[in-house]
Image (cartoon, rainbow, N blue to C red):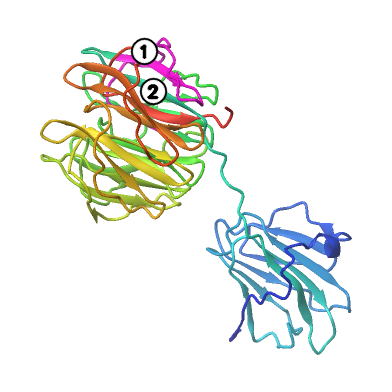
């Protein structure tokens, strides 16, 4: 077919239920690249994996109706094409291409007559995509007191750090951590007497599970962040590695993906923009100030020239609804400076330090829209915390709870306060 009929919006009500009430809805979700549909039915079209061509009936009577709906909000990526199968569509013959290319779209087709053929009574877009529920709690885990440990500390939705929970899993330092599955977390990799490849899942109640045999290159000083709403990514690490491992919504760690960007360790990462991630700063023989953005599909972008003081062993977390903050770390000595990240992934300039300058600390989002920095090394092992409000303002030191330690990691979990 040649030519194009666009996704013309004939109605802006966003409601198809009244005219579609008498339809018989298909119980099968359409996932194939082609499907032939019947009048009097509604169809859920899932184009997550591929585009779909929908063939309409070859004959129709006035008033025949078909409804198609974007099941997974993916028509913008993998389009839907209608084949009018010899009948007209909006007055044009079937040599024209009819394509729908907007996420969340639903199309209510009515057959008129042989002149105009099929007409979209409504081809509306669901304007507001359902938002991922914000995580409310956080967990800090593992680290070093001079000896490796596996203890954890839960953080409630008000930013209160709880006392030590006995270790589950192999004691180690410098693992990576991230949320996954909307309300759970994972610790992975790290260093015992050598780099290891193992993981420990954290339930939405904050319970740490026993070791799971690792996937991917054993390493320490990697970093993790959530992306795509319900998935995670762990990337980079020592010795000066540039690779990533994706974590699916069930907490399964994927195999190594060839890296993009400057190979380095001792960096930090956080979610931003609601469904994307950012890795920034780090060390590869010297401190670096670069960032790498991660798309909502988990693809790591090339280096972006850094903003702010090059440093290592810092921490990062999301805050607000779609922002992030990097903070603290080691330059030539410990620092407490922070850098805010916009919802477009742009790293801001240095913000003067508040709180004890320290390195080897951890951070996590909590309370839906706030963040917490905690633990670290300020010349000795530390359990100080600094809360970050929903505007990205870092509060002064608050007395710590739990074993003072460094090379610890944190992640958000639980959508229940």
Q: Which residue lies furthest to the top in this view?
A: 166
Magenta stretch, main secondary structure class: loop
Classify residue 367 as left or right of residue 338: right
171 in magenta? yes
- Label 1 crowd bin: few (<14), some (14–19), many (20+), radius 10 Å: some
Does the image show residue 342? yes
Q: What element carries label 2?
A: strand
Position of residue 106 relative to residue 90, above or below, is above
Q: How far apart are marks 2 and 1 (CA)?
A: 10 Å
Q: Is mark 1 on a helix, strand or loop?
A: loop
Point out the image quarter for the N terminus.
Answer: bottom right
Magenta region: 149-178
Q: Which of 120 and 190 is in front in this view?
A: 120
Residue located at (38% from left, 23% from top): 140
Does the image show residue 176? no
Classify residue 377 as left or right of residue 373: left
Give the foreground label among 2 and 1. Answer: 1
Point out the image quarter for the C terminus.
Answer: top right
Q: Residue 162 in the image: x percent, y percent?
A: 44, 15
**Mark 2 or mark 1: which comes first in sequence?**
2
163 in magenta? yes
Q: Residue 127 in the image: x percent, y percent?
A: 63, 60
- Label 2 crowd bin: few (<14), some (14–19), many (20+), radius 10 Å: many
Q: Mark 2 points at which residue?
A: 140
Q: Residue 293 in the image: x percent, y percent?
A: 34, 51
Q: Say which quarter of the image contains residue 266.
A: top left
Q: Which of 406 and 53 is in front in this view?
A: 406
Q: Mark 1 points at which residue?
A: 402
Q: Give yes or no for contact between labels 2 and 1 (Cβ–Cβ under 8 Å).
A: yes
Residue located at (54% from left, 29% from top): 414
């Amino acid at each position: 077919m040649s030519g194009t009929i666009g996704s013309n919006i004939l109605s802006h009500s966003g409601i198809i239920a009244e005219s579609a009430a008498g339809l018989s809805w298909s119980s099968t979700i359409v996932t194939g690249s082609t499907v032939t549909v019947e009048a009097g039915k509604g169809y859920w079209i899932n184009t997550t994996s591929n585009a779909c061509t929908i063939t309409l009936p070859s004959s129709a009577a006035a008033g025949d109706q078909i409804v198609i709906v974007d099941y997974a909000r993916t028509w913008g990526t993998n389009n839907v094409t209608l084949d009018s199968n010899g009948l007209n569509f909006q007055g044009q013959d079937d040599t024209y291409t009819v394509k729908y290319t907007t996420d969340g779209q639903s199309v209510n087709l009515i057959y008129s007559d042989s002149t105009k053929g099929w007409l979209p009574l409504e081809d509306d877009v669901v304007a507001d995509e359902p938002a991922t529920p914000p995580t409310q709690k956080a967990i800090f885990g593992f680290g070093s007191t001079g000896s490796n440990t596996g203890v954890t500390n839960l953080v409630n939705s008000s930013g209160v750090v709880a006392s030590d929970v006995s270790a589950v899993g192999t004691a180690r330092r410098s693992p990576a951590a991230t949320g996954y599955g909307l309300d759970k977390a994972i610790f992975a990799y790290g260093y015992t007497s050598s780099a290891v490849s193992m993981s420990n899942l954290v339930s939405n109640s904050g319970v740490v599970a026993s070791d799971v045999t690792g996937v991917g290159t054993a390493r320490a000083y990697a970093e993790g962040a959530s992306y795509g709403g319900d998935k995670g990514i762990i990337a980079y690490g020592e010795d000066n590695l540039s690779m990533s491992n994706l974590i699916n919504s069930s907490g399964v760690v994927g195999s190594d993906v060839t890296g993009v960007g400057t190979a380095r360790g001792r960096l930090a990462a956080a979610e931003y923009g609601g469904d994307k991630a950012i890795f920034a700063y780090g060390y590869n023989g010297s401190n670096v100030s670069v960032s790498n953005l991660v798309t909502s599909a988990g693809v790591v972008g090339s280096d972006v020239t850094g903003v702010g003081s090059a440093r290592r062993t810092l921490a990062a977390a999301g805050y607000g609804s779609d922002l992030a903050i990097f903070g603290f770390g080691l330059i030539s000595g410990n620092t407490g400076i922070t850098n805010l990240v916009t919802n477009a992934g742009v790293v801001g300039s240095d913000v003067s330090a508040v709180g004890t300058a320290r390195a080897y600390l951890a951070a996590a989002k909590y309370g839906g829209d706030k963040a917490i920095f905690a633990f670290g090394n300020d010349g000795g092992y530390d359990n100080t915390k600094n809360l970050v409000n929903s505007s990205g303002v870092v509060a002064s030191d608050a007395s710590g709870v739990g074993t003072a330690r460094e090379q610890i990691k944190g992640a958000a979990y639980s959508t229940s306060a």
